[in-house]
Amino acid sequence: MNDTQVLEIQHAFAQQKDNLQQLEQQVSQYVNEITAQHEETLVATVLHHEPPPPWVTSVIEIFYFVAAILFILGLKRMSSPVTARGGIIWAGIGMILATLATFFHPAIHINIGWISAIYVISALFLMLGLKRATRADDGGIGLIIIITSIIVAMTPTLLYPSNYGLIVIAVMIGSAMAWISAKKVAMTDMPQMIALYNGMGGGAAAAIAAVELAKGGHTMTIETLAVAGGLIGSISFSGSLIAFAKLQGILKKSFIFNFQQLINLLIFITILALGIGIVSYGAADSGPLVITFFMLTLAFGILMTLPIGGADMPVVISLYNALTGLAVAFEGFVLGNAAMIIAGTVVGAAGTLLTQLMAKAMNRSLGNVLFSGFGAKVQASNTEVTGSLKPIDSSDAAAMMAYATQVVIVPGYGMAVAQAQHKIWELTKALSDKDVKVKFAIHPVAGRMPGHMNVLLAEAGVPYDMIFDLEEINEEFPQTDVALIIGANDVVNPIARTDPSSPIYGMPILNADYAKNVIVIKRGSGAGFSGIENHLFYANNTRMLYGDGQKMAAELVHSVKAL
């Protein structure tokens, strides 16, 4: 090897060394840039994103399992008015356990320790603010504490973004809104609140489905479950909002147009086709299909609920409750969350059973409820009303009840509107003081939601052993001296037994017309939700006590005590 070749080799080595030094400088510069941009995230990753020990995962699963058991036991206790309050508390404890377990889930990214302390302190101040916000004397201070706690919780989240912080803020805002609204809502508006909360549950399930479909990377089975949950949850969300608007009086009429059911059917078929397309081509590559899918499902929920009349609201609320539970269960499979699967399945099963019971109580199929527009417009009956409306004053009605042996009170939605339940309980106690036996007769679909009348009477203090359902009380009406009807209409209409052409024919009713005397407290002579005249009001043994339910009940109390 001559000198020239040696020089060439040395030059090549020197050039390679320069290239390596240049590459090292570029890599170092790139690492420095990345570190500068994501310093906090990297620190958090090093400190807190290590895989948790196996016992942590086991404890989380145990918490979920205990929460599911509490859900089931709470739902069981809710089946009886005696234990319903305890059932709600049990289910609430289960929800708290499930939420706490979620905070420690490996998928939740926690940043720096002092931020967690701020979240805990903010949550404590939020609870203090919620407690004070319901007081008349310092409600304003409570609202200030609530707003301040939310702002304090948002500050570190904006500086150090994390799933944990977002969850805490969402829980705090949702808790504040729910607590204040629940404390201030009137009992007469409880059906609207139930419909709204049903919708929120369905909307949450649909949101989970949308996020998971947008992320992609799932198996075909998981994507199928996500699509199914998104479909059901979206329908429940938008349909429940329409039900809320109807109950609240925002939508004062039902909307029925030509070929409505055909249009709904075509939309539903299109939704199914889009769902199949999303699963077949992969959610990650089907962005436009996913967006169109959710837009159509929301529209379908609206169009399906718009033609349904007020008479069917108890059934509709039960149905959407079942759909929400089913959607949550599907998304539980998507996330691999046992608590969601169990709780959603239980709620879905209970809602389905309740829907069937409500439809049976009206002697109608679920399809007839959803597609007939019953209660949306007046439907004629072939049987003409005979007789006349016979008024009575409060003093005569009071005397009739005070000297009776047994009085059966039949409440309906009119009592809820008049907020007369407390005066009715006063009347009951006044009659009991005169040795009159008083019972309450409750129809399964009385009011605007399942159990509406039971809730109102329980709030007024009526003992549970004085409240009887249709099957228990109907055989006692022939031995009843006075049946007092306050706010009930279709559920006591005898035409349901006699006229096959009536839209309520075959619906089980309370046999109030079999009582020796019937007193009806009513503001006017309007028809019920079904839009037909109540033949009971024209019967020979019926007297009409016209006026506001609460005012008339107060007059009856005064007159009974004066006897």
Image: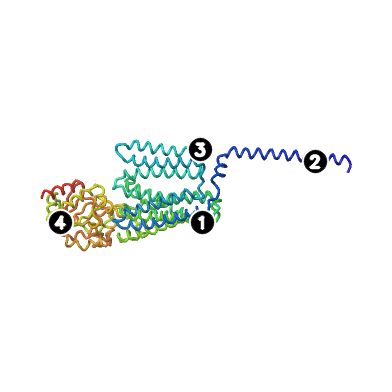
Residue annotated with mark 1? 222
Q: Which residue type carries mark 2?
A: Ala
- N-terminal of the pair, mark 2 or mark 4, is 2
SS label for mark 2: helix
Alpha carbon separation for disc pair 3 and 2: 51 Å
Quadrant housing residue 492: bottom left
Say which mark, if any, is on residue 159: 3
Do the CB atoms of the residues marked 1 and 2 lie less than 8 Å apart?
Answer: no
How far from the left and from the top, in percent, is residue 257? 37, 51
The residue tagged 2 is 12
- Mark 1–mark 2 Cα distance, whole angstroms, equals 57 Å
Say if mark 3 contacts mark 2, CB within 8 Å: no
Q: Mark 4 — residue?
A: 436
Q: Give amino acid for label 3.
A: Leu
Residue 194 position within the rendered picture, expressed as x and y whole percent measured from the top left: 35, 50
The crowding category of the residue bearing disc 2, from other C-alpha atoms within 10 Å (few below 14, some 14 to 19, many at least 20), is few
Sequence-wise, the earlier of marks 3 and 2 is 2
Residue 280: quadrant of the picture = bottom right
Q: Position of residue 328 (x, y in %)?
A: 44, 54
Q: Nearer the viewer, residue 71 or 416?
A: 71
The residue at the far left in this view is 563
**Helix, strand or loop under label 3:** helix
